[in-house]
Image (cartoon, helix red, strand yellow):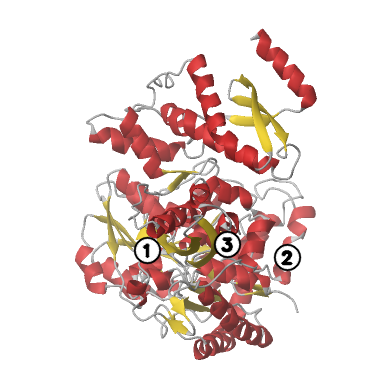
Amino acid sequence: MWDYSEKVKEHFYNPRNAGPLDGANGIGDVGSISCGDALRLMLKVDPDSERITDAHFQTFGCGSAIASSSALTEIIKGMTLDEALAVSNQDIADYLDGLPPEKMHCSVMGREALQAAVANYRGETWSDDHEEGALVCKCFAIDAVLIEDTIRANNLGTVEDVTNYTKAGGGCAACHEGIEEILGRVLAERGERFDPTAKATPAPAMGNLARIRKIEQTIEQMRPTLQRDGGDIDLIDVDGNRILVSLKGACSGCQMEAVTLGGVQQKLIEALGEFVKVVPVGAHAHAHGSACATEA
Amino acid sequence: MGPIYLDNNATTQCDPRVIDAMMPYFIEQFGNPSSMHSFGNKVGLAVKKARAQVQTLIGAEHDSEVIFTSCGTESDSTAILSALRAQPERKEIITSTVEHPAVLSLAEHLEKEGYTVHRIGVDGQGRIDLDAYRAKLSPNVAIASFMWANNETGTIFPVEQMAEMAHEAGVMFHTDAVQAVGKLPIDLRNTHIDMLSLSGHKLHAPKGIGVLYLKRATRFRPLLRGGHQERGRRAGTENVPAIVGLGVAAELALEHMAFENTTVKRMRDQLQDGILAQVPNAFATGDVDNRLPNTANIAFEYIEGEAILLLLNKEGIAASSGSACTSGSLEPSHVMRAMGIPYTAAHGTVRFSLSRHTRDCEIERVIQAVPPIVARLRKLSPYWAGDKPLAEPEKAFAPSYA
């Protein structure tokens, strides 16, 4: 049995906004090949404000697909289309207090349905650019297609490389056999053989300064969203892969803090292309953190 | 109302008589059967008795044909790898598309090591293509390995006939009989089956015990080498309590063989008929006229199996599904795909597997519980409208797949 959170179960047993929506003016139909699941998202958008006044779903899928659909409709109701488009699959998973790694694609399907429905409302055609493969790394939910593409794009040759670029294999290491197999297959395409004794190529070169700038930029991009909810975020320090931040106002100490941090972390991981952990620091640690920053 | 367990093809409850028989071998007679002292002096006899009980259940000619292993998977691996090592000049394996992963994953791995694997297909009812099988038998084949009964649908393969065909072609024959042993009468001495795998926990013995039947004089190479246990064919200290438990379970299975094929079968049929009479767009999968007496696999179209299981579980009913989502794999059950069941039905398959512990009142409760659950999920399904599927559902709802 999957280790579903109480929130996933609750949304599965009592799905919100299920069933057809009369007068929907944005409809997104998407499926996830990896699960055979499929979802129809129906939006009612007010043309003047571009605000989503109602959202319904119909889902052919497992418990977490239904729960993710239900969560998505709750999240986006009342949002403008642009706000809704900023909702990530991680936001959906966070709303549900997390999903098992094997089930993260259910939240991805939700986000894609949203993009498709908005495109449909705007009279555009939506085409999906991402392809899912078999789940290889269960610690970080990385699938075979992502690993293959990353190996090809960066000419990777070792398991360590793959871990540096994708996180896959960086946890329990049980998937290393699978990663070696993918490496063997992709290397064979370019006429090379997988060599288990080969040294990893150095990690992608991003100097300290460039890295911190990138972190700052990413946080700047998220700031308006947080401020809209009456909160704010400050970068305190960067300590290896730990990014220390302080949350202010409505964000600080509220129940949504963990959710916000998860979202910030996900955005930073995407921006930096490496695994980082976002750690909140309070007033006391704040001062200490500042001192460290000054010393550094 | 207690919970209802209809997932006996996954594993079974230990019979209390099995546990009682095992207990002394944890506490009083805990010695190593190889030791000379009194803590183990009865242990050798207990293992011998258990071996005879298993021998009787499967109709082996000699008790030395019974090798205790740790599980069905170990027995399968031992059998197939032994055939390859004992006949290094033979580089081919024949099996089916619907085997258990214990065989299929091994075959896939061997393929990467350079062996040729022939996977024989099945028809829409899960019946093996015997002509295709015959065509692949040759002196290049080290082993033909086919399951006796399918774990998902219960469909029975004619393994006795297939073993005969292999024998005529000079090919070793192994059967994964994990689901069949204890449910179907088996008389190995009158067959050409060279090797057979069985697993204790499928017949009310504990987990962690299995058997490889090895017909006398079949060429053999052990998987585990070490001590002299099991006549050097499976080294490693014997799991004595579990062996004793399996012996008792084998005896009980033989006693209940008629019950399994009459009462259990009747309850299974009532369950299937009761559900299909009420639920539209549902059908039984597999070879319904030639399957295990305890298994019914029903496909509910346009909904997904995991969701059904979660709602059944809420009602205290345990079953299993061939949906991809329950396993975290990419595809719905390879067995359903091999039979050509469409995705929209394959994802919604639910397997109910009964045992001699199943009661009539439980079957009635399940028959009542299933229709509203299916209806509730169909209300959420984009393929469904009102009380029936959309006209041409696959066209009416055709999402862009990622």
What is the C-alpha distance between the residues marked 3 and 2? 46 Å
Vertical order, B267 against A44 (above or below):
below
Above or below, A154 relative to B53: above
Q: Nearer the viewer, residue A276 or A34?
A: A276
The x, y position of residue B135, in whole percent, is 19, 66
A120 to the left or right of B371: left
Q: Amino acid at mark 1?
A: Pro
Residue B207 location (% of width, % of height): 62, 59
3 and 1 marks on the same chain: no
In the picture, which quadrant includes the C terminus of chain B? bottom left
Q: Can you tell which quarter of the image residue B245 is in?
A: bottom right
Q: Is residue B258 left or right of residue B113?
A: right
In the picture, the disc for residue B399 is 1
Which of the two marks, 1 or 2, is nearer to us in this view?
Answer: 1
Task: Please name the amino acid that badge 3 sits on.
Answer: Ser
Q: Residues within 10 Å of mark 3 (few under 14, many from 20)?
A: many
Res B180 visible: no
Q: Secondary structure at mark 3?
A: helix
**Crowdedness near tag 1: few (<14), some (14–19) or many (≥20) residues, C-alpha within 10 Å:** some
Which amino acid type is shown beneath numbered disc 2?
Ile
The mark closer to the camera, 3 or 2, is 3
Q: Position of B335 compared to B275: left or right?
A: left
The residue wearing badge 2 is: B19
Q: Is residue B51 visible?
A: yes
- Which mark, residue A70? 3
| Residue under the point 61% across and 66% down | A16
**Counting other residues with Cα less than 10 Å from the Cα at mark 2, is it few (<14), some (14-19), or many (20 or more)?**
many
* Distance Cα–Cα, label 1 vs label 2: 53 Å
